[in-house]
Image (cartoon, grey):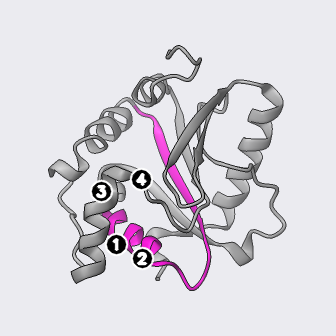
Amino acid sequence: MSQSGVPDFAELLRSAHRTAVHLEMRDVYSVGDEKSSFEEFLRDGRTDLDPDSPFWQGWTPLVRETVARGVQMRRARIVSEPVTDYIRWEHALTPVNVAIGEQVRWLPRRLASDITLPGNDLWLIDDRRVMFHWFTGDGDWAGHEFTEDPDVVKMVVAAFEAVWERGIDHEKFTV
C-alpha cells in the first residue's frame, strides 16, 4: 500500500481472487506512455498487436498471471458515436486484450443515459475494492482514489453490471 492509502495497481490486481473489472468512460485519454503509439496510428493506421512487444510489457504479463489464477477480467467501455480517433485506436488494439484473457464490451453512450454511473473510471476487485482513476481535462493522469466503502462498492457493482449487460462484445462492435 502506498503512503496515500492507494495500493500499487499491480498489487491491487494481484490481490484479486475471483474478478477484476474495469469501467472506462472517457472518449480521449492522453497518458504519456501511449503517446507515440497513438501518434503512429494517426499517421499510418498501424497498431502494435504483438502482446509480447515492449509496448505491452507492462500489461500482458500481469493479465496473463491474473487470468491464470482463475480471475475473470472484464473491461467495459462507454463511448460516444461517432467515436474519436483515440477510441478507434483503442478498438484496433483490443484484440490483444482479448487474446490475453480479458473480456471486452463496448456501450454506445446513447444507450447509457438511464444508468447511474460513477464520476470516474475505475477498477473493481472481487466486488469489494475500488480504485478510481482521475484524469485531467485533456486526458492525462491526475491521481487515484481507493475505497472499500460498502455503499460506494454497491453503486460501482450495479453500474458496471448494467453497462456490461447492455454492452456489445468486442468482436461485434464496429467503429
Tag 2: residue type? Arg
The reply, left or right, for residue 23 in relation to residue 174 is right
| Residue 52 seen in this snapshot | no
The residues tagged by marks 1 and 2 sit, at their Cα atoms, a distance apart of 6 Å
The mark nearer the N terminus, 2 or 4, is 4
On residue 92, which mark appears?
Answer: 1
Tag 1: residue type? Ala
Q: Nearer the viewer, mark 1 or mark 4?
A: 4
Contact flag, marks 1 and 2 (Cβ < 8 Å)? yes
Q: Nearer the viewer, mark 2 or mark 4?
A: 4
On residue 147, which mark appears?
Answer: none
Q: Nearer the viewer, mark 3 or mark 4?
A: 4
The residues tagged by marks 2 and 4 sit, at their Cα atoms, a distance apart of 16 Å
Q: Which secondary structure, mark 1?
A: helix
Tell me the residue that label 2 is attached to: 88
Tell me the residue that label 3 is attached to: 99
Magenta residue check for 82: yes
- Residue 168, quarter of the rendered image: bottom right
- Residue 107, quarter of the rendered image: bottom right
For the magenta stretch, what is the residue range?
Answer: 70-95
Tag 3: residue type? Ala
How packed mark 2 is, by other alpha carbons closer than 10 Å (few <14, some 14-19, many 20 or more), is some
The mark nearer the N terminus, 3 or 1, is 1
Q: Could you tell me residue 47's position as x and y percent? A: 24, 70
Q: Could you tell me residue 116's position as x and y percent? A: 82, 56
The mark nearer the N terminus, 1 or 4, is 4
